[in-house]
Structure formats: C-alpha cells, structure tokens
Amino acid sequence: MDDRGGRPRNGRGGAASTEDMLEAENNRLQEGLSSKVSTLKSLALDIEGETKDQNRYLDSMDGDFDSSAGLLGGTIKRFDTMLGAGRNNRRLMCYLIAIIVGIFILAYFLMTRVTR
C-alpha cells in the first residue's frame, strides 16, 4: 500500500516511475550545478591571487614614483637656483643648450650620410 514516504500507491505504477525520472533529472542537474560552482570557485581563487599580485606590483611602483618625484623636485629646485643666480648662469645655460642642439644636428647629418 505505501510506496515511498507514506503515500498510497495507485494500481498503475506510473507515478512512481515519473517520480524516479524527476529525481534522476534533479540529480543530473544537481551534479551539473555542482561542477559549475566548483569551476566558479576556482576562477574566483585565481582572480584573487592575480589581484593580490597586481596590488603588490602597484605598491612597489608607487614607491618608485615617490622616489622619482623627490629626485625630480630636488633637480628642479637646483635648476631654479642656478637660473636665479645671475646673468652669467643664464648665458652659460644658453651656450650649453646651443651646444647640445648642435650635437644633435651633427649626429643627424652623420646618421643620414651613413645610412645612404
């Protein structure tokens, strides 16, 4: 009289086979969902590891940029001091810039002659 769970069984047996089919389908879907969840978990752990690595890299870059900013700030202060020191320093700076531009022009002409 009782099949499963205390339910009365009708004489056909169709309800039991339908329940078995539904239970098998539920088990199959549950296994599929379980595999998808485990895949998502592994992806989440990979993303977490990559994020931690990137944060460490960015933190090290931040320190490098801070030290570069300090070095550049000191250089600019020295440059301003040199320019503000008087007319002789300005004249020296103009000569220095002219010499550097001349070297670049000479290097350009030498490179074009060599590549021909």
Image: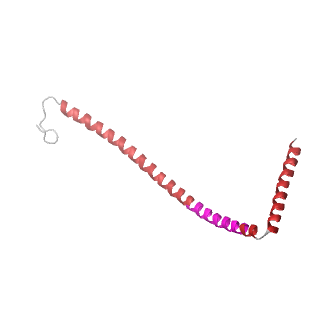
The one of 11 and 114 positioned closer to us in this rendering: 114
Image coordinates of residue 81 in percent, x first then y, are: 73, 70
Residue at left offset 84%, top offset 51%? 105
43 left or right of 25 in image: right
Quarter of the image for residue 10 reads top left
Q: In this view, does 27 lie to the left or right of 75?
A: left
**Which quadrant would the N terminus be assigned to in this image?**
top left
Specify the farthest residue to the front: 87
Which color scheme is applied?
secondary structure
Asked if residue 26 lies left or right of residue 10, the reply is right
Horizontal and vertical percent for residue 39? 42, 46
Residue in the picture at 55% in, 61% down: 59
* Number of on-image labels: 0
Q: Nearer the viewer, residue 32 or 72?
A: 72
Rendered position, 32 above or below 72: above
Q: Residue at x 15, y 38 (%)?
A: 3
On screen, residue 4 versus residue 114, left or right, reads left
Is residue 93 highlighted in magenta? no
Of 87 and 51, the residue lying toward us? 87
77 in magenta: yes
Span of residues in magenta: 59-79
Q: In which quarter of the image is the C terminus?
A: top right
Residue occupying the point 56% across, 58% down: 58
Relative to the observer, which residue lies in front, 68 or 88?
Answer: 88
Q: Residue 52 location, x and y as percent? A: 50, 58
Please, what is the dominant secondary structure of the magenta stretch? helix
Measuring from the top left, give residue 4's x and y in whole percent.
17, 40
